Structure formats: structure tokens, C-alpha cells
Image (cartoon, rainbow, N blue to C red):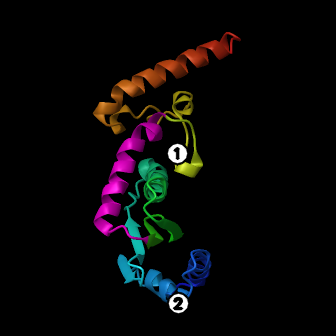
């Protein structure tokens, strides 16, 4: 069995920061993660609860899409944290992850159904930023349209219009047009 002491340590630090280190033993949280628990919940005396939530997003292991899939999962994992924090729905921290599984410790009053709803909303609202926004690793946005337009490799499609939802195609065309004008300006010596 793998060593999950780092999860126990992060859980302990998080519980202490939240003033809940007496509520559950961090060893128990580490055990739950090690066992691959999908969801766990412990009610607290004030009506709030602690939850362990696993977000699972499978990774396609084909060379041409593997890295993009891993980067998408990074975006998704950070969207859940933003959904909770930006809507003041409690406190959440990422305890551990691999390429497909993300384990969070949550403290608050939000139910799992509401968390799922808020997560979906955050992802949908953030899709234009994912496709067309500036690079922002803190939000899980890696790369930008400009880099896509200057990418040279004959066996990889540098301009994956087929991957973008149809409703966002007008945004894509606008962003591509903007980046092409920037590239033309740089070639002419205009900035």
C-alpha cells in the first residue's frame, strides 16, 4: 500500500487551521483517501459538517490527447475550489491528487447535490476563459490562443476547432482574429 502520510499531514494542518482538529483524527482522513473513498461526511454539533469529496475525471491515455486531458483535469479541480470559495459556501482544500482523482476536505453546510450544481455552473461559466483567456495556472488555464496559432508540428492539429463547443465558435473566431492582427503587427515592427 502506498504511503499516504502526506495526506494525514495536510489534513491535520487544515483541520487545525479551521479549528476542527478535535473533530476527527487526521489519520482517519488519510485512511479514507488511501482506500479511495468517494464521499464521507461527519456532522458537527453546530449543524455544519466535514466532508471528504473525491472528484474523478478519467484521463484518455492516447498520446495526442493525454496532456490536454491532464490539463483539463487541473482546470476542473480548481473550478470546484472556486465554486465553493467564491460563493462563500464553506471552506475547501485539496488534500491530494493523481492524474484522475482529486480529494478535497470540505467544511460548511452545503450538501453534495448543491456542491455538484455549483461545480457545474462554475465550469460552464469558465469555459470561455479556458478556451480563450490568458494563461492563468492558478485557475487551471494553461496556454493561450496565440501560442496555438504559432505552433508548428505537422502531425498534430495546432488549431483544434473541433474540440470547442459550437456555442463558443464565434468567440474563437474573434480571438483568433485578434491574435493574428497582433502577430502581423509584431512582424511589421508595430506593437
Q: Position of residue 131 (x, y in %)?
A: 44, 37
Q: Position of residue 91 (x, y in %)?
A: 49, 66
Q: Residues within 10 Å of mark 1 (few under 14, many from 20)?
A: many
Per the image, is 41 magenta?
Answer: no
Q: Earlier in the sequence, mark 2 or mark 1?
A: 2
Q: Residue at x 35, y 62 (%)?
A: 115
Alpha-carbon span between mark 2 and mark 1: 35 Å
| Quarter of the image that includes the C terminus | top right
The answer to whether residue 156 is seen in the rendering is no
Q: Position of residue 42 (x, y in %)?
A: 39, 83
Above or below, 161 relative to 100: above
The answer to whether residue 13 is seen in the rendering is yes
Q: Residue at label 2?
A: 25
Q: Indicate the secondary structure of the residue bearing disc 2.
A: loop
Residue 84 appears left or right of 9: left
Q: Residue at x 52, y 27 (%)?
A: 149
Q: Which residues are magenta?
A: 108-132
Which numbered disc covers residue 141?
1
Are the two marked residues, 2 and 1, in contact with CB atoms closer than 8 angstroms? Answer: no
Q: Residue at x 52, y 50 (%)?
A: 140
Q: Position of residue 35 (x, y in %)?
A: 42, 84
Q: Quadrant of residue 58?
A: bottom left
Residue furthest front as drawn: 46
Amino acid at each position: 500500500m502506498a504511503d499516504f502520510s502526506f495526506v494525514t499531514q495536510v489534513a491535520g494542518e487544515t483541520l487545525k487551521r479551521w479549528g476542527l482538529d478535535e473533530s476527527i483524527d487526521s489519520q482517519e482522513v488519510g485512511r479514507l483517501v488511501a482506500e479511495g473513498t468517494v464521499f464521507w461526511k461527519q456532522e458537527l454539533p453546530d449543524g455544519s459538517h466535514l466532508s471528504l469529496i473525491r472528484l474523478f475525471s478519467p484521463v484518455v491515455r492516447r498520446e495526442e490527447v493525454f496532456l490536454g486531458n491532464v490539463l483539463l483535469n487541473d482546470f476542473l479541480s480548481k473550478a470546484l475550489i472556486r465554486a465553493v470559495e467564491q460563493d462563500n459556501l464553506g471552506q475547501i482544500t485539496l488534500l491530494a491528487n493523481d492524474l484522475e482523482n482529486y480529494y478535497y476536505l470540505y467544511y460548511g453546510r452545503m450538501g453534495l447535490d448543491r456542491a455538484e450544481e455549483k461545480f457545474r455552473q462554475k465550469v460552464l461559466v469558465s469555459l470561455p476563459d479556458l478556451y480563450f483567456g490568458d494563461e492563468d495556472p492558478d485557475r487551471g488555464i494553461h496556454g493561450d490562443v496565440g501560442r496555438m496559432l504559432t505552433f508548428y508540428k505537422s502531425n498534430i492539429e495546432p488549431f483544434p476547432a473541433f474540440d470547442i463547443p459550437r456555442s463558443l465558435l464565434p468567440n474563437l473566431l474573434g480571438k483568433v482574429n485578434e491574435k493574428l492582427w497582433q502577430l502581423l503587427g509584431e512582424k511589421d515592427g508595430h506593437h
